Every structure is written in C-alpha cells, then in structure tokens.
Amino acid sequence: MSFPANRAFDAPVAGGLLHGGIWGADDSAPVLAIHGITASHLAWAEVARALPERRLIAPDLRGRGASAPLPGPWGMARHADDVVAVLDHLGIERTQIVGHSMGAFVAAVTARRHPDRISSVLLVDGGLPLDLPPGTTLDDIDRALGPAAERLGMTFESTEAYRAFWRKHPAFAEDAPAGLDSYVDYDLADEAGELRSRTSAEAMRFDSRELYGSDVVMDALEALDGAILLTAPRGLQNEKPGLYPPEVLARWQQRLPDLTILEVEKVNHYTIVMGERGAATVAGVIRSQWAASQVEDGH
C-alpha cells in the first residue's frame, strides 16, 4: 500500500525548479521535512500518515528525486536556502523543521541561516558530524559511504529488479515499510537507456564531505536552541551500534548541553522515519514541539 503526497509543487530556486510533495490540508500548520543524502520526499510518507492533522511539506533536495537535474554547487547552505525558497513559494512565514540523516544537517543550517523562519528543530538520526571509518579520508568518500555510494553506480534490468534489490536490503529484511515499492519506483530513472537511481553521485560526494564536520555545520549546531535529536540503535545495514554509538553521543552531549537526545527503540537508520514505529515516534515529537511553541507564543 502506497501513500503518495496529496499534491506536488515546483518552487523557483537558483538554476531552476525544486520539486516536492505535500500531505495534509492547506489550512493546517506546516512542517518542513528534509530527507537524507540519497533519498527523496517520499521518505516522509509514513510520517505524513502518522501526522494527518498537519501539512507536511517535503522537497526533493537539489540533486535528488525530481530535483536531480538542478545544477551545483550543493552543500548544506545551498540546500538551506533552497528549502526556504520553498517556504517563500508556498507563502509560509514560519514553520517547524524536521530532517533525517543528511536532512538533519540541512535542518540545523536552515535554522542558523534563517532563524526567523524556523520555530523548532527536530534532528532524526543525523545532524551531528560523523566519524570517518578507520583508514579512510575525505578524499576516499565513496569508500566511507559504502553501499549507499555503490548503489548509485549500479544499473538495473527493470523496475521489479530494483524493487527486489531494496526488499533484500538488511534495513528492510524484517520490517519493510508499506510504501517501499512507491519510494523505490520514484527513485528509478531511465538515463540513456539504463535504469539507475535518480540521485546525482556528484551531488552526493559534494554534500557528504560536510557530514564529517564543516564550519557551516558546527556553527549551526552551536547555535541550536531547544532542538531534539532522535537516534536509532541500528545503522544503515541494520547493524549495531547505529550511526551514533553511545560514547559518541555522550561526547556530543557534553559539547551541546542544550540538545535533547532520545533513542527510538527497535528501529534502524531507515525505519526511524520509513517504518511505522519510527514514524509514529517522529510524529509524536513534532506534536510536542508544536504544543511547546504554542505555549511560548501565548496561544
């Protein structure tokens, strides 16, 4: 069972149009949702299902999904300005923002660059700089990214072959999301007669360097006020520990004492947003942040 967005949008940005999808009624309070490094707006379908009372706005970032043709440069600052252009296009003055994986980095930078546009920040298994795997450097970024980078170099015989590839993915072996096939179909593109992921490998490589720490990211994290980070105990391949081992989180908690860090049980890096359990938790935190902001604003 799929859960496509209610409607699409194309927002003017530098170099063209940024595509995305919207769930929920136009008169409901907005939530801006930012996907990960090789994902698309459909990564948020299950969260939208768990949050029916809100207008969830999810762009395809530059270099991904239907926004793949947009030119570089990429980077967190460029993505932040792009997603604020979406708010301008939709006539939204202020919104909550939630980001997953690389989208969490974008969310933090957006709040830093455009603080008057963002009411609260929710980071989902991302946003804190990663540690490079032993023996790798930023000049060997494909090796650091592992299977995610490998997939972008692969071609597939058919849509069904790409679906089968994802169904066998360790992250979904035990608990495949209801909308996985729709998510996978949207990611597949015909390029010169070859079926491959829409995500630009060049955009991924460019953006990934900032995930291991940059001045832009660190400045944004240091400026966060009242943000929440949800973490997954399992990683991209459903392995333990997850993206952020306990000792790494402890180190960051000391450095960022105002950041609230919460673990979501029984999820991995993908299912924390794409699975029913993870999506319900993300939706619940979005609701709690909204309620807190309403109290602060005197509503």
Image (cartoon, rainbow, N blue to C red):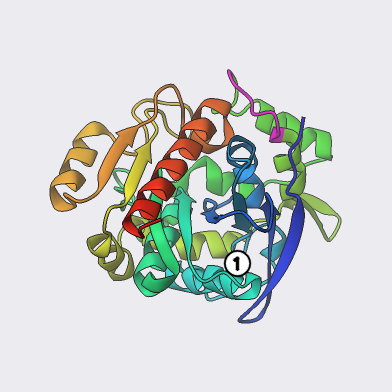
Quadrant assignment, res 111 = bottom left
Residue at screen point 82% across, 33% down = 160
How many numbered dots are placed on residues in this image?
1
Q: Name the residue furthest bottom.
A: 14
| Image: 286 above or below 113 | above
Residue at screen point 59% across, 26% down = 172
Left or right of residue 146: residue 50? right
Q: Name the residue furthest left.
A: 254
Q: Say what secondary structure mark 1 lies in.
A: loop
The N terminus - image quarter: top right
Q: Is residue 95 magenta?
A: no
Residue at screen point 24% across, 49% down = 259
Residue under pointer 1: 62
Residue at screen point 40% across, 61% down = 119
Residue 133: x and y, percent?
33, 44
The C terminus - image quarter: bottom left
Q: Nearer the viewer, residue 106 or 121?
A: 121
Q: Is residue 148 visible?
A: yes
Residue 217: x and y, percent?
32, 64
Please name the predominant secondary structure of the magenta segment in the image.
loop
Mark 1 is on which residue type?
Arg
Q: Which residues are magenta?
A: 174-180
Q: Is residue 123 visible?
A: no
| Image: 204 above or below 251 | below
Left or right of residue 68: residue 114? left
Residue 4: x and y, percent?
75, 44
Q: Is residue 177 magenta?
A: yes
Residue 53: x and y, percent?
61, 43
Left or right of residue 198: residue 134? left
10 Å crowding of disc 1: few (<14), some (14-19), many (20+): many
